[in-house]
Amino acid sequence: MFRKDFVAIALLLTATQVGAEPLTATQYGDFDRYVLALSWQTGFCQSMHDRNRSEPEECRLQQETANKTDHLTVHGLWPGLPKSIAARGVDDRRWMRFGCATRPIPNMPEVKAGRKCQAAETGLSLEMANKLNSVMPGAGGNSCLERYEYAKHGVCFGFDPDSYFGTMVRLGGEVKRSALGTFLAQRYGQSISREDFDAAIAQAYGKQSVKAFKLTCNGNPAYLTEIQIAIKAAAINTPLSADAFLPQPHPGNCGKQFVLDKVGN
């Protein structure tokens, strides 16, 4: 059997694990990366409280779980700036702010972050919606995070909704089951160093992958709210491995030491 046959089989098996076809952009596909955004849900909820923001339903209902990696939840999957859109004078900053609503193209209807439920329904199958709800607490209900994410980062690429969200479900699960996920579970509720966090990344995916991970923290002392991971566009439909990542220009704002917040803190 030729190598390309192995690759084709791997792609099929990876996709069918979450019941979706491989993720494919039918337009504006000339980008080199995705950013997988994973929330540390307890920290995210604490940051909403600390910033005097309206507490989402999923934060009010948040409960302790036996499996601490359950607190590592899916936020989104963001395609990088396509070359064809950059050629129209759009830079990365504007692209990340407006996504599919960027002008002059793609110029799709903009949905405000504070009005997520005004976004159109995604068209997710019931099966995939159930899988997504288990890893994205803001999906469905009164938060409508999945509608907002698809409107801003998915619809203009022509992504099949099940494939788009199925890819998030799969990738989030892979991170949870990695050495990094084990590290987060073991250090739940503790103060950790960025050095130890980076060592867990290196154990999971190799030392060269450390710069692909950007961390966002809030508060003083700092506590983790989000992990953003840069993944090669060409590797999005295969299991995460040492050669799947791309470096990011900034490591984030968490500094040398930060806390993995617990429920109720």
Image (cartoon, rainbow, N blue to C red):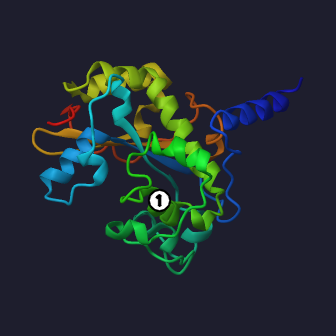
Q: Residue at x 62, y 69 (%)?
A: 84
Taking the view exactly as shown, the residue that stands out farthest to the left is 220
Q: Is residue 185 left or right of residue 189?
A: right
In percent of width and height, residue 122 lies at: 56, 62
Residue at 16% of width from left, 39% of height from top?
A: 222
Q: Residues within 10 Å of mark 1 (few under 14, many from 20)?
A: many
Residue 58, percent from left and from top:
31, 48
Residue 253 in sight here: no
Quarter-of-image position of residue 238: top right
Q: Position of residue 5 (x, y in %)?
A: 84, 30
Assign the N terminus to one quadrant of the image. Answer: top right
Asked if residue 223 shows in the view, the reply is: yes
In the depicted structure, whether residue 7 falls above or below residue 49 = above
Q: Residue at x 37, y 35 (%)?
A: 72
Residue annotated with mark 1: 149
| Residue with the most extreme bottom position | 104
Q: Is residue 160 above or below residue 7?
A: below
Q: Give SS at disc 1.
A: helix
Which part of the image, by quadrant, shows the C terminus? top left
Residue 49 vertical placement versus 15 (above, below): below
In this rendering, position of residue 233 left or right of residue 2: left
**Amino acid at pointer 1:** Glu
User: Which is nearer the eye, 14 or 97?
Assistant: 14
